[in-house]
Amino acid sequence: MTVQFQKALEQQKAMAAREKKRLVLLLGGFAVVAIGLGTTLKQALSSGAAPEPVAITDESLQSEPLLAVPELDLARLATLVRDEETSDRVVLESEAADLVLDAARRYTPRHFAELATRELDQALCGELRAAPAAARGQPFTARGRIVDLRARSGAAHEAETLGQLELEDGSVVHFLALELPEGSASTGGFVRLDGLFLKVFATEDALQKGTWNEGPLLVGARVERSYPSLGTLSKLSLQAFDGIQDADLAPDPGQEIRFVTETPFEPFWTLMAFARDGAQDVDWGAAPVLDQRLLDQIQADPEAWRLQPVVVPISRLQDGRVSLGGENPARMGRYMQGWIGNNTWKGVIQFRSPVLHTDFQIGELVYGQGFFLHNFAYEASQAGLCVAPVFVLSSIERFVPEPSAALGNVGWIVGGVGAALVAAFVVLTRRDRRRAEEFQQELVRRRRARSGGSLTSSAAP
């Protein structure tokens, strides 16, 4: 019986060892799974995160030296100019004009931009006529159509032009300038002048003798080409987009390849003005979402999609900048442009927008809505010559993904299962030890119970 009990004890120990071994293997396998799951969880939580943040470029923020305003002797100018009486306003004092022109030729576009130059309109022209001395030598801007031009010889016989503008509200402004723009240096041309106010001036109407046109006289170095304002644009006229071209690098047999590498000026600014003023009336809920199927349709038949509203889904901002608008009919000083890509698209899209986001960073997620303008060709660094659609976006917003509650709970589940396995390992180990001790004690008790009588008798003298 002792041998049988010994074998039973060894079997019990072997069984406990096998259980421990299986439990250790299970715990080790769980550790491997937990590490893999943790890595996957980390990648899942970080997917969609932007790469190293790179701020977009703002062309209006340039590291330039401090602005030095050209000096003008206002005290001397006051002694040279007379415009209090009506009879004084038909005379242009040459010495005063040369003095102001000498200062104006040292002004740059940056001076007029940073000095918060006011644009002349009917109300401001009235203020200058009422109190010209208070604004003498100050900078102003005038936009209008040329109605009269006269050549004038200035200091050292320098060629100058004395002209008259009709502003868009009908006001009269006179100007004295050295340079006129090509193509607009004639009666009827629409121009812009940044200049210094000299006096209230009056000239006789060339078509109506005895009629005098009175208004502020601005003195500037150069007159620039400009465009009539589009104003508030709540509706689009399809005529403004007639003849717009689209790039096509893979035309049908018999057709020529079209290399369209620039966006036409007037259609672009017209659509920009509409995106700023009229996009709120569009039913964006009915607009299609931009996917690869829609991109293929736009490239195959751009005319059918011209000016159509489109929703841009959550995508990656691959490049962006805030650009200076220059002189344009939408009267936008700055606008935003860049490139957007999406993992579900074969290529990218270019966007322009009147909405400015100087806080955006390249690489982050954005979404928006806008209008298709045309397809144009561009040179990609690796793919060579490609075609991309240009969209004018009425809105573009940053997308910040919310942390997933399900993914966050996975960590707690993994930790809980791991803790349960460790606890089970400890409990089972203690149970096996206790059972082994109890079994050993039971074997001893049975052995003593079976041999207790003979052992006692043999021990007597």
Image: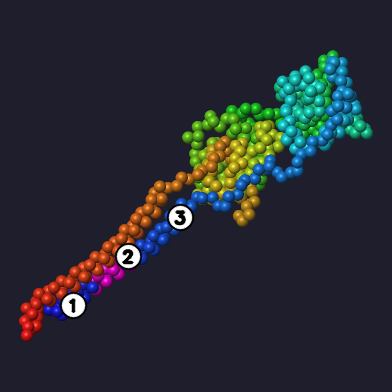
Q: First in sequence: mark 3 or mark 1? A: 1
Task: Give the tally of numbered discs.
Answer: 3
Locate residue 150, reporting x and y percent. Answer: 86, 26
Residue 32 higher or lower than 245, as above or below: below
Image-based side of 347 in relation to 210, left or right: left
Numbered disc in front, either 3 or 1:
1
Identify the element where label 1 is drawn: helix
Q: Residue furthest front?
A: 461
Per the image, the residue denoted by label 1 is 7
Locate residue 461, reporting x and y percent. Answer: 6, 85
Per the image, the residue denoted by label 2 is 26
Residue drawn 54% across and 42% down?
A: 398
- Asked if one can make out residue 3 in the rendered structure from this viewpoint, the answer is yes
Q: Quadrant of the N terminus?
A: bottom left
Locate residue 370, reporting x and y percent. Answer: 56, 37
Residue drawn 68% across and 40% down?
A: 60
Residue 445 higher or lower than 156, as above or below: below
Per the image, the residue denoted by label 3 is 42
Distance, label 2 to label 3, CA atoms, is 24 Å
Residue drawn 77% across and 30% down?
A: 139
- The three-letter amino acid code for the residue at tag 3 is Lys
Image-based side of 240 in relation to 298, left or right: right
Q: Nearer the viewer, residue 93 or 347?
A: 93
Distance, label 2 to label 1, CA atoms, is 28 Å
Q: Main secondary structure of the magenta part?
A: helix
- The three-letter amino acid code for the residue at tag 1 is Lys
Q: First in sequence: mark 2 or mark 3? A: 2
Distance, label 3 to label 1, CA atoms, is 52 Å
Residue drawn 86% across and 24% down?
A: 78
